[in-house]
Image (spheres, rainbow, N blue to C red):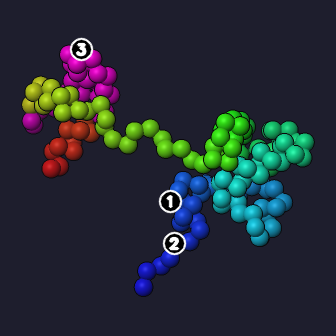
Amino acid sequence: MTKLPTKIDRLRERGMLNTYPQRVRAPQFVAAGFFDANDLLQVKYEMLRHARQDGVTKAEAAELFGMSRPTFYQAEDAFERAGLAGLLPQPRGPKSAHKLTSQVMALIHEHHKEGEPIQARTLAQLVQSQLGVTVHPRSIERALARKKKH
């Protein structure tokens, strides 16, 4: 029998799990009930509401809800731009080696001899000069290591 995912599992999957729920000291979150300190969206919204409606400073609100001031300002800006949807987590950067196209990899393989040390910095400079693509040397090392595994 498969175990059903808990609310914490679902929050984690969606990137909305508050990593530090124990830092939230706002009374409504301390008492068990509707408010859940694990729910980052709820914590951020209530932090913004508290500062706006209850007249506390932004620094005080951030502290009470276990957030940093920069996080408060980021949440405030996102909420002003997109409402509650702005507080939802946004996907972060590329998840693949998107610059390592077949053309780039062909050039790398042409200049890298199997079994010799990887001169990733030199290969990155070569890719930059010949193709005009800036690739981090570590990306080249990872790509060659992936190729070696297959």
Q: Secondary structure at mark 3?
A: helix
- Please report whichever mark, 3 or 2, sits nearer to the chain's N-terminal start: 2
State the CA–CA distance, disc 2 to disc 1. Answer: 10 Å
Residue furthest out toward the right: 55
Q: Which residue is mark 3?
A: 129
Question: Label 2 crowding class (10 Å Cα cut-off): few <14, some 14-19, many 20+?
Answer: few
Whole-percent x, y for residue 5 in the image: 51, 72
The part of the chain drawn in magenta is 114-139
Front label number (1 vs 3):
1
Residue positioned 83% across, 48% down in the render: 50
Look at 23% across and 38% down and name the residue there. 143
- Which residue matches tag 1? 13
- The image quadrant where one finds the N terminus is bottom left
Instruction: State the residue at coordinates (56%, 71%).
Output: 6
Does residue 125 appear in this view? Answer: no
Residue 119 x/y as whole percent: 20, 26
- Asked if the residue at tag 1 contacts the one at tag 2, i.e. Cβ–Cβ closer than 8 Å, the answer is yes
| Chain-order first, disc 2 or disc 1 | 2
Q: Which mark is residue 5?
A: 2
Q: Quadrant of residue 107?
A: top left
Where in the figure is residue 14, as x and y percent of width and height? Answer: 53, 56
Q: Amino acid at mark 1?
A: Glu
Work out how far the residue at label 1 is from the one at label 3, CA to CA, in angstroms. Answer: 41 Å
Q: Is residue 43 above or below residue 144?
A: below
Q: Tell me: 80 left or right of 92.
A: right
Name the amino acid type tagged 2: Pro
